[in-house]
Structures are given as structure tokens and as C-alpha cells.
Amino acid sequence: MKDIGLHSIIKKVLLEEVYPYVIGDDKAFTKREVIFFKFINEYKESANPTSQQINKFIQSNASSFGFKLDDFFELYNRYTQNYREDGNYEDTKTSELKQVHNLKAKKVTNSNASERVSELLPFKGSNLEGRWEQDGKSDWGYIVLSYGWYPIYIYKYKKWFEVSGSYSSSTGKQMNNTRPTRWNSKIGKEMLICSKDEMAEIRRGAIKPDQLIVNKNNKFTETIDNLIDSRTLQTIRAGWFPRLKLSFYYTGVRFNEKMPEVDININKVDKINNNKIDRDAGDFFTDNMVGVTKEYLKTSVTSYFERSFTEMLGRDVSQNIMVNITYNK
């Protein structure tokens, strides 16, 4: 593949020396988009890529042109639906702009639906479809429906939403066939997992992502506060080598910006061996439990809470939580 000259193009962009045309009301694309689309054209001419290779190319290079991760799907579709072989994107008028939500649905097998989902393209499978809808507030969303009724994935407000329950085993299989993260693992870090009612609210425009996160945070703190007030003893298993059985009380909960922070007081630690409590393992609280240090316990407990809190909050909080531990035998 010939050298596309990314660094020289970016330098010219910063100096505003490239394609110095005047943006008007009739221009479909911003100056930044025009330059980026010309750059993608050079890649297409050099590499003859597949649609998925173009997808990954845009993901990999968009940030170099000042675009955010949230801009990816809009960029991808604006480019692919309005591709110009001549590269003269500055000549495309707003009235000529092709919108992805106006495309007709393509018949596909369910096993091949994921590529259509990754590009936000309408499709019809077997009791499975993806389509664009506009809510009562004129906001567009891409909806993946199971059996023509249940939204299992929604792309809206530049964010993906996934239903937390699969309704049935057949719908669960459909979810695996259309999972957006299949082609872009970064989506999983930003995706929000929602109840059926929350998916319905997103679909009709009754709630937006920021408020949804606030609601989930409030429900999370309320749940933990209730456990604190009731002095409910919690028992979990954490760690693997060795496996531990722990009992603790929640003593505090808060959010530092979007990061959940909890305080717990551990009052019992058992070491598990062959799925049974090892009575000869020693006393953890006197630092005499073989192979179990406070550092190992904290790492194991934090890992457990990362999984648990991700499920409770409906978003990936791995490596983004704080667990403060005290001990009281």
C-alpha cells in the first residue's frame, strides 16, 4: 500500500492550508470531514479494503483528525453513504446528502446480521430486524428487534444500549448474532445495560443516557444504604488461587464523580480447598493463613465487586471502583 501521508495531512489541517473552501449553509460536510474523507479515499484506492477493513481504518484514524469515539458511527455512515470516487466532498450539498435511516432493509441470515448492526444498516432476518426509528422528539435511533417487538440493542444519542434479559433462549441466540461488540470491542466499555422498561424509555425518547446513569447510581446507593441500615451480613466467594469465602458488612457508599466507592468491614475469612473450607489453613486475622495476604484479599474482593457493580450499574466499571476494607474478627 502506498504511503498515505497521514502526518503531513494532519500538519496541513492544523495550519489550515488544505482545501480552503468556505463552509456555507448548502455544504453537507465540515472542513474536517472533507479532509478525513479524502484521506479515507486514498486508503480505498491503495488497499481495496472490505467494508469491515474500512470500518476499522476509520476507528483507528478518526482521533488523529480530532474526532471523538462517539463520532465513529456517524462518520462511518456519512462517508459510506456519500462516497465520492472523485474525492470532491466539498462539493456535496446538504440537499444531496444520503441518510442511512432512509435505506431499505436488506434480507440477511441471522448469523450474518452482526455486520449490518456494526454499520447501523437496516436488515431483516428470521424474527430479527434492525431499523431506524424517529421518536416523538425527532431523535433518531437504530433499533434491533427480536420477534418484531422486543428491542435487544439500541443505538441512540451516540451510545449503545443492551437489554439485560434475553427474554428466551432463541432471543439470547439472536443477541449473540447481533452483538455490536463483535466488530468493535471498545463499544463494551461505553455500552449501557438496561432493563426492559429502560429500553422502552430510551426507544421512545423518555430518558437520555445522563439521566439513566444518574438513576442507576441512585438505585445503587439506595440498595447499599439499605444493607447498611439493616446490618445485613454479606457472604461471597472471591479469588481463585486460593479461593476464599468472606463475610462482611457494608459500612459506607458514595460516588466520586462516576466511580463507585464502598466501605466494607470483613469479619470472617475462610480458605476453600476442593470446594470445602480448609480448617487447617490458619487464622487470616493474625496473618497466619497460608497463601492469603491482605493484598491478595483486597485484589480478590475488588475483582469480585468490579463484576458485581458492573451488573448493578449497567455499565463497565472494571478498574474504576474503590473498595476500602477494615477488619473486625
Image: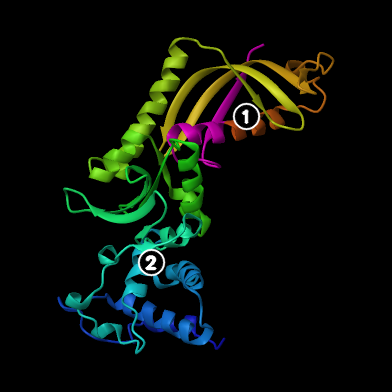
Horizontal relation, residue 34 to residue 229: left or right: left
**Marks 1 and 2, how far apart at CA:** 38 Å
Could you say where residue 240 lies in the image, as x and y percent from the top left? 72, 32
Secondary element under disc 2, as helix, strand or loop, is: loop
Residue at the image point whose x is 69% and y is 31% from the top: 239
Does 328 appear in magenta? yes
Horizontal relation, residue 86 to residue 9: left or right: left
Secondary element under disc 1, as helix, strand or loop, is: helix
Could you say where residue 306 lies in the image, as x and y percent from the top left? 55, 35
Quarter of the rendering occupied by the C terminus: top right
Quarter of the rendering occupied by the N terminus: bottom right
Q: Please tell me how crowded label 2 is: few (under 14), some (14-19), or many (20+) other residues with Cα within 10 Å.
A: some
Q: Please tell me how crowded label 1 is: few (under 14), some (14-19), or many (20+) other residues with Cα within 10 Å.
A: some
Could you say where residue 311 lies in the image, as x and y percent from the top left? 49, 34
Q: Is residue 158 in view?
A: no
Looking at the rendered structure, which numbered label has been put on residue 177? Answer: none
Magenta residues?
305-329
Task: Quickly name the residue at label 2.
Answer: 67
Residue at the image point whose x is 46% and y is 15% from the top: 228
Residue projecting furthest to the front? 126
Residue at the image point whose x is 49% and y is 10% from the top: 231
Task: Quickly name the residue at label 1.
Answer: 301
